Amino acid sequence: MYQRTESGHSKEFFNTVDAKNYFLNFTNKMKLEVEKMSDSDITSCNFQEFADYLFNKHFISPILIYETNIEKTLFETKIKIGNLLRGLPYERDFFEMDGVRITFKIPFDGEPALFEVKPSSCILSRFFTRSFVKPYEDDCGRFTLDLEYTKQELQEKGERMQEYVQNQFANEFRSYKKMIDNINVEVDQYNNGLNAMALQLLETRKKKADSFSAISSALQIPLTTSKNAPNTNPIQLKRIVRKPAIKPNIISATPESCISDYDYENINNIISMCGITMEKTARTYFANTEEELRDHLLAALNTHYEAATGETFRKIGKTDIHIEFENKAAFIGECKIWHGESMFQDAIQQVINYSTWRDLKVSVIIFNKKNQSFQPILLKIQNWTNANAVSYIHPQENIWKCKYHRNDMNVDITLTILAFDLYVDKNQFKDIRYENI
């Protein structure tokens, strides 16, 4: 095989912009967008909804290679061979031999600009492609790698010709995949911190608006705000160990032992948005265990509520997600991977059994990883809801908000069921991390 050079290749990979500057550019764009918000907008907007908008807008899709769909084409060409006598009088620098060029067309998905990024961890080599096509609408992108041989070289391999070429391609492509993996690691780090970064920028902008409002009040000049502006300082759930040992003032005349409807809806909305993100990048999450999927939800919840914990002891067992407010049970959630209708019913009963007289608002989060069709799962959940719920609403195809009567306590429990589809056809791509799944 003759080594490829830059000559004849239209694009060089992984050498245009440093990763640090690439991600900083996205961060600065998001920061500028938040800074341009008016005082009225920042005091009127729902932080989580706007943070979700910023997350979706500035999310970067990692590169996904479809190795099982690589195509090969064969072309006749002339191979330039260096002349060992070049430099001598009347000697040419090279001469040509009949040869072939094998072009490997490699399909991919994700952000095409990432191929121009130089990751922090690099291989000391240069990477070229003769053809590069970006993803468009429903079509994947693709790039090519070329191997060139003299006909004599291939003919000498005899029956091993195909194996020889494939091994040469595997060795060549291994370096490309390593660079892509290095870039994707930095992409995941950026994406994982995106929601928290958005909320921090919004909070900083709100503090600036609050400061201006204080000056306005001191000068007795009123601010113009939206009529629908919510409380800009909502009550948040706090971890007790982080607060001084001072009893909070009780301001409600009506006994309130459980989480408010507002916070319960907000928690389920956060879980829903996190689940939607998982579905959009299911290949990142489908190998996770129940505990690992739970941890992703906890990471999102902890950007909003400081007392979100996993595997917290509660009454007769452990619950996956448990948030407590002022020494009262506030939220119980159970994460389960779908293993059939019977185990789903067990999960419902499990979270119900965890509840006490204070735990009247619970959720069950279902993840599908094994079933190619998601609709039969949704139908089974719907049938369970029809048969067991006192009443329910069905705001989205994958969400049920139910009233469930617990006979032994003679109380109605608010139960939300959320289902997410993380099924991935593993035959569409090859990744050694998932071979045993």
Image (spheres, rainbow, N blue to C red):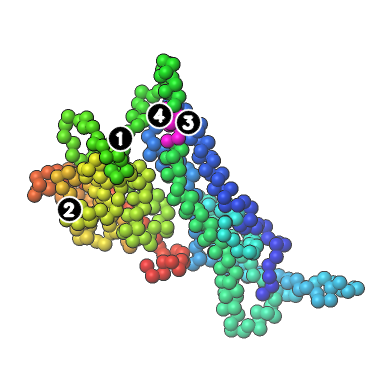
Distance between the alpha carbons at the discs numbered 1 and 4 = 15 Å
Q: Earlier in the sequence, mark 1 or mark 2?
A: 1
Q: Disc number at residue 315?
A: 2
Q: Earlier in the sequence, mark 3 or mark 4?
A: 3
Q: Is residue 410 left or right of residue 221?
A: left
Q: Nearer the viewer, mark 4 or mark 2?
A: 2
Q: Mark 4 highlights which residue? A: 43
Q: Is residue 153 above or below residue 298?
A: below
Q: Quadrant of residue 270?
A: top left
Q: Disc number at residue 123?
A: none
Q: Which residue is located at x 39 percent, y 29 percent?
A: 44
Other residues around mark 4 within 10 Å, as few (<14) / some (14–19) / many (≥20): many
Distance between the alpha carbons at the discs numbered 4 and 2 = 41 Å
Q: Mark 3 highlights which residue? A: 37
Q: Quadrant of residue 294?
A: bottom left
Distance between the alpha carbons at the discs numbered 3 and 2 = 46 Å
- Read off the magenta span: 203-210
| Residue 220 at least partly seen | yes
Q: Earlier in the sequence, mark 3 or mark 2?
A: 3
Name the amino acid type tagged 4.
Thr
Q: Is residue 310 left or right of residue 21?
A: left
Q: Mark 1 highlights which residue? A: 235
Q: Is residue 324 left or right of residue 226?
A: left
* SS label for mark 1: loop
Distance between the alpha carbons at the discs numbered 3 and 4 = 10 Å
Q: Quadrant of residue 12?
A: bottom right
Name the amino acid type tagged 2.
Lys
